[in-house]
Image: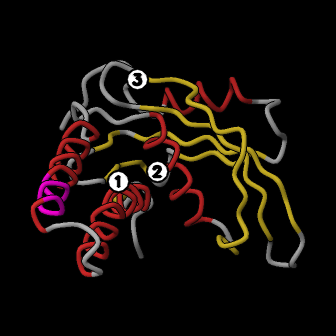
Amino acid sequence: MRSFARLAVLKWKRKRRCRQVRLLLMPLQILLELYLKKKYPVKTVVIAIVVVVFAVILVSVLSSGNGKAKDEDYISAAETIISKQLKAPSTAIYSDENIEAQDDYGRTIVSLTVESQNSFGGYVTNTCYVLIESYDTEEDTFTYNAATGVYISDFGDSFSDTYISRLKESTDWNKPSDE
């Protein structure tokens, strides 16, 4: 039997990064099609291709940032964690996604509302609170404690302060980690 107290590490590929590359490569495809149709001279097409390739490289370097995770990264990680606990994750609709707290050591508490199908086929709405202990932008991985890092509430935001304080107590909030 697996230990619930272990730290879970999940990987996923960012779909938005693939979408960005596809959008940037579309002009290159158009230029190649124009060249093949003999509408522009070779020199013009080559110069245009070099400019497009340079732009793609420049955008990818600039979008990589400083290695610090963005709010969207934490929210996406929280959605991944919650999806793993749902009976029908494909029916999940997320809303009200917020960063509730962040400490100086990379720990982040995310709250979100999820509406999804339960075992009986009915839809239920829950407010979820997730403590993400670390996020590695280079590897696209994050860590969380599966036993103490997630609270799912049927009561909406009524006990949000309680859940957030419990998540902070479950870790050494605002203190360096032992790792």
* Amino acid type at mark 2: Ala
Q: How far apart are marks 1 and 2 (CA)?
A: 14 Å
Does the magenta portion include 88?
no
| Label 2 sits on residue | 77
Quadrant of image for the C terminus? top left
- Disc 1 is placed on an element classified as strand
Report the disc number at residue 173.
3
Viewer-proximal residue, 36 or 166?
36
Viewer-proximal residue, 121 or 69?
69
Crowding at dot 2, Cα within 10 Å, few <14 / some 14-19 / many 20+, comes out as many
Residue 80 located left or right of residue 63 = right
Specify the segment rendered in magenta.
Answer: 44-50
Residue at horizontal 82%, vertical 39%? 156
- Disc 2 is placed on an element classified as helix
* Amino acid type at mark 3: Trp
When the figure is inspected, residue 85 is found, relative to residue 71, above or below; the finding is below
Q: Position of residue 48 (x, y in %)?
A: 19, 55
**Mark closer to the chain start, 1 or 2:** 1
Q: Which mark is nearer the camera, 1 or 2?
A: 2
Residue at horizontal 24%, vertical 81%? 36
Tags 1 and 2 in contact by the CB under 8 Å rule?
no
Q: How far apart are marks 1 and 3 (CA)?
A: 16 Å
Quarter holding residue 13: bottom left
| Label 1 sits on residue | 7
Q: How many labels does the image show?
A: 3
Please say whether residue 76 is visible from this viewpoint: yes
Residue at horizontal 48%, vertical 40%? 72
Residue at horizontal 9%, vertical 61%? 43
* Amino acid type at mark 1: Leu
